[in-house]
Image: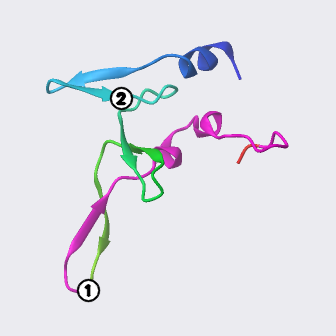
Amino acid sequence: MDAILRSKLNANFSTTRKGHTMPQCKTCRAEIVWITMESGKQMPVDDVPRVVVVADDGKVASGRPSHFATCKHATLHRRTTEGGVKQ
């Protein structure tokens, strides 16, 4: 991992928009939102709602994609297993 990306992982990034502080990804600096999953764990998602499902009855459900799926540096954020392999 190069020194610039390593330093970004140790920094706190945020932007201010409409009077609110928005967290940013530490490596690509995209604005993210933290959600709490059913398991109680936190997960970063992109700050752009996207339509993901249109039901047969016409109801639309929207969601946000996991930032791990869209970040070009996602591998830097993955935890390692006991053997040192990235998950």
SS for tag 1? loop
Label 1 or label 2, whichever lies nearer to me, is: 2
Give the alpha-carbon distance from disc 1 to disc 2, as whole Å.
36 Å
Q: Main secondary structure of the magenta part?
A: loop
Choose top left, top right, bottom left or bottom right for residue 81.
Answer: top right
Looking at the rendered structure, which numbered label has been put on residue 56? 1
Residue 42 % position (x, y): 45, 45
Residue 7 vs residue 50: left or right? Answer: right
How far across and down, in percent of the image, does residue 3 sit?
Answer: 66, 13
The amino acid at mark 2 is Pro
In the figure, 5 relative to 28: above or below?
A: above
At 48% across and 57% down in the image, what residue appears? Answer: 39
Left or right of 46 on screen, residue 72: right
Disc 1 crowd rating (10 Å Cα; few below 14, some 14-19, many 20+) is: few
Q: Earlier in the sequence, mark 1 or mark 2?
A: 2
**39 or 58: which is nearer to us?**
39
Q: Magenta region: which residues?
A: 56-85
Observer-nearest residue: 55 or 10? Answer: 10
Q: Is residue 68 magenta?
A: yes
Tell me which residue sits at (60%, 20%) in the image: 5
Q: Which residue is mark 2?
A: 23
Picture coordinates of residue 61 (x, y %)? Answer: 26, 68
What's the residue type where badge 1 is placed? Asp
Question: Is 26 left, or right, of 24 in this rendering?
Answer: right
Depicted 82 relative to depicted 3: above or below: below
